[in-house]
Structures are given as C-alpha cells and as structure tokens.
Image (cartoon, rainbow, N blue to C red):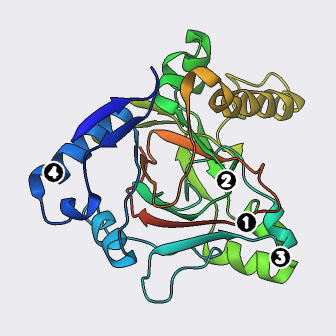
Amino acid sequence: MRVEQLTCAIGAELVGVNLADAIHDDSLFAEIRTALLKHRVLFLRDQDISRAEHVAFARRFGELEDHPVAGSDPDYPGLVRIYKTPENPNDRYENAWHADATWREAPQFGAVLRCVQCPPVGGDTMWANMVLAYENLPDHIKLQIADLRARHSIEASFGAVMPIEKRLALKAQYPDAEHPVVRTHPETGEKVLFVSAFTTHFTNYHTPARVRFGQDANPGAGDLLRYLISQAYIPEYQVRWRWTPNSIAIWDNRSTQHYAVMDYAPCHRKMERAGIIGDRPY
C-alpha cells in the first residue's frame, strides 16, 4: 500500500490496496487505521466491492448505525443510501459544513462512503481539518471558548422541512445534544473545534464574565458562534475529492467536517455510507 498525501493540511490517497483484503488482514487494516489518524480522511479509487464487503470493512472500526431520516439499505442495516435524482425536486438541496450526527449524545466515529453513481463533472465532496482550525485560532478566542458548551440539533436541520407534528416527534426521539465547543480527540489527545451547521447556540455563555447586560448575550454569543463555524470555510484547511464510480472515502468524524457540493443538477448522484458509532465528546 502506498500513501500519497493530497494537501498540506488533510487527506491522502491509498494506492495499491483493495479494501476487501483489509476485512481479514489485520496488518493491512492496522496500516489503514494509522493512516486515517494521521491524514484524517483517506481516498481510494477502483474499489469494486460488494455492499456486504463495504459493511464488513466499516465494521472493523466499530458497530454501524442507521440514520432516522436518510434511508438505509433494507438488506444491510447501517448502510445509508444518499441518492440524489433529477426526478425529486427536494434533492436539489444539499448541506452545509458539518460533522455527522453531532445531534447524537455520541456522534459518529467516522464513516466509509462509496460512490455508486456520479455526474461526469461536479458533485465533489470537501473535508476540513478541525484540529488545524482550532490550533490557528487567536489566543484570546481559545481562552474565551475553553469552557463553552453548545447544543446540536436534528430538529433544526433535518426536522426543519417536516410538518410540525413530525418535527416535534423527531426532537422527542432525539433531544438536542450538548457537547464541548472544543473537544479532545480520544485517540490522539488533540484539541478539535467542534461546532458546525448542526450547532444552534451556546448553553453556558450567559455569565457575568462574558455579559455586562442581558442584551450582550445574543449578539455576543451569536457572532462568536458564526465566527467559529466559519473556520471550516478556510481553503488552507481543506481537501476536495472528485468522485468516480467505486471510489471511496474514509474519514475521522471526530476531527473533520465535510461538505457535499451541489453543482451537478440535473444529474444522478448515488452514494452509500456506512456510519460507525462513536463515543461521547469530552
């Protein structure tokens, strides 16, 4: 296996390896996992693997989870189908910079995403290094956010387009999760900036140390949150991957965010993602 770094900040392509071999080869899997921790997102091309092999490889990292809104393959629980088609006008909407499932108390460890069908041009996915985003923050901002916590919501994101009864039922099933604004990576010990499009507000900003008068809280907290979320937008922290059929991305959801670019209408884009259960951020 050859590891070819793609940018100075994040991402590497694995060459000369078949992921199906890593299902049973402990040494090969250990190499892949080590590369993942170093580069945060790994890419492979020409991986003609079955859904069963896709799921089996992803399970080497941990158990898989379904998504309450996106549909899963009926034969392979945990293999989420992200299918965009010209026939469905609702598919013309894509997403914002985010880490997956931070609205859960225990967001995902990571994911293995395979391209089934993609446009001839467009439909790329981008990832950002949120360890580097934290490291490069000004010192006074690091001090300001050291103890801050924030809410992450499925209701305000996936639930926003639902009728109110269905939206409230979704929130009842998945109450907003609270996480530290700066989490510690459980394997590397790195500090990670951990707010994204799922983050709605800080939960402990309104204190005498930060707020002179009550009206300080709303603009102060809102402006700070928007500034922190915008750090993922910085090109120097990013890598961009152009999909081809049977190409694969594996990423560490604990230290990255990603963004699927919606620039390919009216084409098909069909992806399948195995999301791996993670642990509670601290």
Q: Going by the image, does 32 lie left or right of 64?
A: left
Give the structural element (helix, strand or loop) at label 4.
Answer: helix
Q: Going by the image, does 86 lie left or right of 138?
A: right
Disc 1 to disc 4, C-alpha distance: 37 Å
Tags 1 and 4 in contact by the CB under 8 Å rule? no
Residue drawn at (28%, 72%), measured in percent from left and top?
A: 56
Crowding near pointer 1: few (<14 within 10 Å), some, many (20+)? some
Name which residue type carries label 4. Leu
Q: Of label 3 and label 1, which has the lower sequence position?
A: 3
Crowding near pointer 2: few (<14 within 10 Å), some, many (20+)? few
Instruction: Between label 3 and label 2, give the one nearer the viewer.
Output: 2
| Residue identified by numbered label 4 | 28
Instruction: Between label 2 and label 1, give the one nearer the viewer.
Output: 2
Where's residue 126, x and y in %? Answer: 59, 40
Where's residue 112, x and y in %? Answer: 42, 58
Does residue 185 appear anywhere in the picture? Answer: no
* The label number, if any, that marks residue 158 in the structure image: 1
Name which residue type carries label 2. Pro
For residue 117, which quarter of the picture?
Answer: bottom right
Q: Going by the image, does 248 lie left or right of 172?
A: left
Q: Of label 2 and label 4, which has the lower sequence position?
A: 4
Residue drawn at (63%, 24%), measured in percent from left and top?
A: 235
Where's residue 107, x and y in %? Answer: 48, 57
* The label number, if any, that marks residue 87 in the structure image: 3
Q: Going by the image, does 246 lie left or right of 93?
A: left
Give the structural element (helix, strand or loop) at label 2.
Answer: loop
Q: Nearer the viewer, residue 104 or 133?
A: 133
Instruction: Between label 2 and label 4, give the one nearer the viewer.
Output: 2
| Residue identified by numbered label 2 | 120
Give the structural element (helix, strand or loop) at label 3.
Answer: loop
Instruction: Between label 1 and label 4, give the one nearer the viewer.
Output: 4
Disc 2 to disc 1, C-alpha distance: 28 Å
